[in-house]
Amino acid sequence: MNLSEKIKSVEQSITLALNAKAIELEKKGEDIIKLTAGEPDFNTPKPIVEAAYEALKAGKTKYTASSGIIELRDKIAKYISKRTNNNYNSDNVVVTNGGKQALFNVLMAITNPGDEILVLDPSWVSYEAQIIMTGGTPVHIPLDFENGFQPDKKKIKRYITPKTKAILINSPNNPTGMVYSKDALQDIADIAKEHEIFVISDEVYELLVYEGTHYSISSFEGMKERTIIINAFSKTWAMTGWRIGYVVGPNEIISQVGKIQSHSTSNVNTPTQYAALKAFDVDVYPMFQEFKKRRDYVAKRLEKMNLKFILPNGAFYFFISVDEFGYSDKEFSEKLLSEVGLAVVPGSGFYKKGFIRISFATSQENLENALDRLEKFVMNFRG
């Protein structure tokens, strides 16, 4: 059967694949702890749920504008304007079915066949797949553990070609949890302006920063018209299953993003949009505090095991070196799962071999149990 070669070349998401394998073992009665999925374990805050319910009761179940209800787009524009010191309005916003659709629509809007999109590794698993599916060519730029996985200007410039269309950045970062420094972002901004390329800035973890400051590259001089911001309600407000995100950017790009959405999914689920509108009024600081407490606990346990990692300044992941064990990261992950019932994600899934990613977006009890198992595995290996 003559199927799309482009789609056939795309690998399944390794995070979902590992999670599915762990779930399968659980169904067989095995005692498995999963630190695989990047999903808050908290329930969506009640005021957000109630806002969706009230919208349903009020009959708000019809189509909306494909780019989203004007009230939500206005709210997002004001929120992003305040955070970036820019002046955005509703015409600069499209509400999407999660952050993934936001990114996909943007790539569809800017990419011509053969265009190169630069990706800083380690990188989220769906970046390469989406670039390929939208007709572009992913160009991976390896960042160094020794440099805290911070972007390196000289290295990035070596990968620029006449075909470069954009650079895709993610801070706070999945899988490393690193927050890009102001200097590193300034370097990227300088490169973007010098070579007249776009920056796609994935900022879904922007409010989960434990040390330092999150800077949106759109706030740098001359970058508003070159930056497309990807964001979502999934992580900060524990709304992963609601599937709602958004794109903010220059009018000429956002109009194309809206056109794409009008011909694909139309609008986001209508009651969900009213739930997201309420989210801006909900205090999520208690969840933030719990994440920070968990991060500090995991760091202490990993230090006790003498494992190599960089303390994450944001998001809810640790990226841990496993080179010392003599296995590939995939083999190491498989052994963890089969020998001690602990599911993690191999770093090669994020284009960085020799590491594993663990998520601390789970309960304290699960973390304690999981780290006991990891410690047992490490101690047994070291003898």
Image: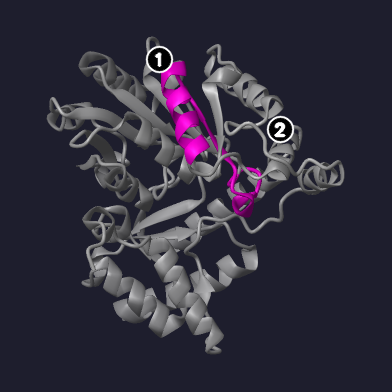
Q: Nearer the viewer, residue 119 or 98?
A: 98
Q: Which residue is mark 2?
A: 280
Q: Start and end of the magenta stretch? A: 234-263
Queried whether the magenta region covers residue 249, the answer comes back as: yes
Asked which secondary structure carries label 2, the reply is loop
The answer to whether residue 54 of the structure is visible from this angle is yes
Queried whether the magenta region covers residue 248, the answer comes back as: yes
Left-right relation of 259 to 292: left
The answer to whether residue 305 of the structure is visible from this angle is no
x and y, in percent, of residue 286 in the image: 72, 45
Q: Nearer the viewer, residue 350 or 302?
A: 350
x and y, in percent, of residue 340 in the image: 44, 81
Q: Which residue is painted at 25% across and 28% down in the image?
A: 165
- The image quarter containing residue 232 is top right
x and y, in percent, of residue 314 in the image: 50, 42
Residue type (three-letter) at the residue carrying disc 2: Phe
Residue type (three-letter) at the residue carrying disc 1: Glu
x and y, in percent, of residue 70 in the image: 67, 25
Q: Which residue is painted at 42% across and 47% down in the image?
A: 174
Q: Which residue is mark 1?
A: 225
Left-right relation of 19 to 29: left
Q: Quadrant of the N terminus?
A: bottom left
Q: Quadrant of the C terminus?
A: bottom left
Instruction: Say which mark, if any, is on residue 49.
Output: none
- The image quarter containing residue 210 is top right
Q: Which residue is painted at 67% across and 35% down in the image?
A: 64
Left-right relation of 267 to 354: right
First-in-chain label (1 vs 2):
1
